[in-house]
Image (cartoon, rainbow, N blue to C red):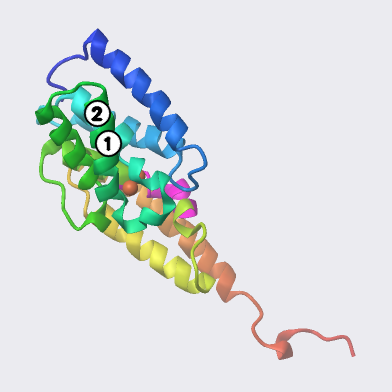
Amino acid sequence: MFSRTLTEDEINKITNMVEFIKDKHQGSEGHDYSHVLEVCRYSIKISQEIKEEVDPFIVITGALLHDIGRVHQEYGGLHGLMGGAIAEEYLEGINLDNDTIETITRIIVRHSPTSMLPPISTAEKIVFDADALDRLGWMGMIRGVMGKRGSIEEILERTLRKRSEDYHKLNFDVSKEIGKELYDQSVMLIKGLRKALDERTLEIENLKLPR
Ligand SMILES: [Fe+2]
Ligand SMILES: [Fe+2]
């Protein structure tokens, strides 16, 4: 649950931050502004459902800034770490105190399995789960296969394995509840695609050549 409501000043800061993020994410492909908003929506939902108390400003700003390191495509797997540095500079610019800045940047650094630093605090776990939830389901599957190299079979296998890892690493019961339905969608989609692949004609002999 949220420990309190947001102040007017915090709402103004969030509104300005949204403009900053929208601008930065322009041109991002899979991890665009709509992904950021979905992660924010899931983060709020999880926060409201769990019994642990979390600060709304910390969770919402962490969710909004979580993929800020994605705006430079070359950061790839390091985007959590690089995003932490970009966010720190931005948060210093809006005059937040050092403790708050550190708490928010830790969410960004620990949101991604590629940072190799697991989430520890409740707020870090919330944004981690919210990000994983937006990788599950139809949209997540599409983002997962976009621009990937390899045969269709390899890409499908790899994507499903990663989604399974995402589902099994979820921290909260409410995340697992939402994730189950989304993960089932992913499995169903992969099964359908596999069936279509299996049914393809692989031998010339199977074609009814007109003779
Ligand atoms: Fe990310
Ligand atoms: Fe993300």
Q: Nearer the viewer, residue 100 or 86?
A: 86
For marks 1 and 2, give the CA distance. Answer: 6 Å
Question: Disc count in the image?
Answer: 2
Above or below, 57 relative to 46: above
Quadrant housing residue 198: bottom right
Q: Which mark is residue 207?
A: none
Dominant secondary-structure state across the stretch colored magenta:
helix
> Does any portion of residue 133 appear in the rendered image?
no
Q: Is residue 179 left or right of residue 151?
A: left
Q: Which residue is mark 2?
A: 91
Give the residues in magenta.
Answer: 132-142
x 31%, y 60%: residue: 164
Q: Which residue is mark 1?
A: 87
Please tell me in which quarter of the rendered image ligand 2 is found. top left
> Does any portion of residue 33 appear in the rendered image?
yes
> Is mark 1 in CB contact (under 8 Å) with mark 2?
yes
Residue 70 location (% of width, % of height): 38, 47
Residue 67 location (% of width, % of height): 34, 42
x 31%, y 13%: residue: 12
Q: Is residue 142 left or right of residue 201?
A: left
**Element assignment for label 1:** helix
Residue 133 location (% of width, % of height): 33, 45
Tag 1: amino acid: Ala
Tag 2: amino acid: Leu
Residue 95 sits inside the magenta stretch:
no
Label 2 Cα neighbours within 10 Å, binned few <14 / some 14-19 / many ≥20: many
x 38%, y 49%: residue: 135
